Amino acid sequence: MRKKRDKVGDGAESLGGELGKLWALAPVPKAPAWFAARTIARLRREEEGKRCWFALPRWVWIGTGVALLAFGWFRWERQPTIQDSEVFAALNALVEEDRESRWWAGL
Amino acid sequence: MGEDRENEIDDALVRRMAEGDEEALRELIVRHQDRVYGTVARMIGGAGPDVEDLAQQVFLRIWRAAPKYRAEAKFTTWLMTVTRNLVFTFCEGRSKRMEVSDEIVDEETEDPILRKESVQERTPREDLSGKELIRAVEAACARLPMKQRLVVHLREHEDMDFSEIGEILGISELGAKSLMSRARENLKIKLSAFLTEPS
């Protein structure tokens, strides 16, 4: 797919003459025959490296893990708290109830 | 006309690649591997593992960017722009690691400021065999500033017009012509020992 340049117009803007011939002496290397195969193999290797369990990308697992941790931490922070006074009130109520039941039992 | 057809084939291949068709990538590589490999080799000097690695990276980038590709310009312009980005980044990294050129280059104009040794001093014309002459041309090419080297390669080897070269380098058509002119002058100096034409 060589583009043919305009020999009349900007075709003049080239090395030209002897310099052009000298430049053309130095060969430009061509890709080795196995280049395409090795590039595809590298692509597969790199794509494979991005995947892990159950063929899901690694970032999906990392993202899920982070989301679960954040959810757990949030729930832990939001769990209902019990004041000391409420605990003592509950204990007092238990003691009172026990005392009353003993009194009714004549103990 | 044929060029438009070639471009249509490339666009169709990229569309297939966007859908994950590896066979389309293989076809695209086969169509353009010499162009990409040759450009990378010319830019970084010779063939070797670095050339193969960079040329492969070009196609992998094309594969990954395929879903976002909009066929607004010619495919080869995009391909060579990706190649240029990778090669320039590689050369900048390499020049930080070691001194690859014996010249100090003006950042603005990319013209050599100091030349320590010329090909002429090292290799008298009479003693040159074909291989040595090729080596001298390669050395002269390697000493050209990166943009000038790329312009000369795209113009002389890929037969691209200056508007396309300008697009690849992110400069105007006039800027590309100016780089070509400077490259020609630099090469004339470096290869003066082998030229019989008056400069």
Image (cartoon, grey):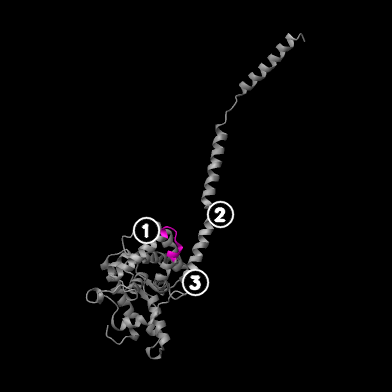
Q: CA distance from mark 3 to mark 1?
A: 29 Å
| Quadrant (top left/top right/bottom left/bottom right) for the N terminus of chain B | bottom left
Residue B24 belongs to the span the image colors magenta = yes
Of residues B172 and B97, the one nearer the viewer is B172
The residue beneath circle 1 is B69
Q: Chain of mark 1?
A: B
Q: Chain of mark 2?
A: A
Of residues A58 and B172, the one nearer the viewer is A58
Q: Position of residue A95 (x, y in %)?
A: 70, 16
Say which element carries label 2. loop
Q: Residue furthest bottom?
A: B126
Please say if B86 is above or below B140. above
The residue beneath circle 2 is A52
Q: Is residue A73 visible?
A: yes
Of residues B133 and B123, the one nearer the viewer is B133
Q: Residue at x 28, y 76 (%)?
A: A14
The dot on residue B49 is 3
Say which element carries label 3. helix
Residue B65 belongs to the span the image colors magenta = no
Q: Position of residue B157 (x, y in %)?
A: 34, 76
The dot on residue B157 is none
Say which element carries label 1. loop
Please say if B21 is above or below A68. below
* Amino acid type, label 1: Tyr
Q: Position of residue A46 (x, y in %)?
A: 51, 61
* Magenta-drawn segment: B17-25
Q: Quadrant of residue B110?
A: bottom left
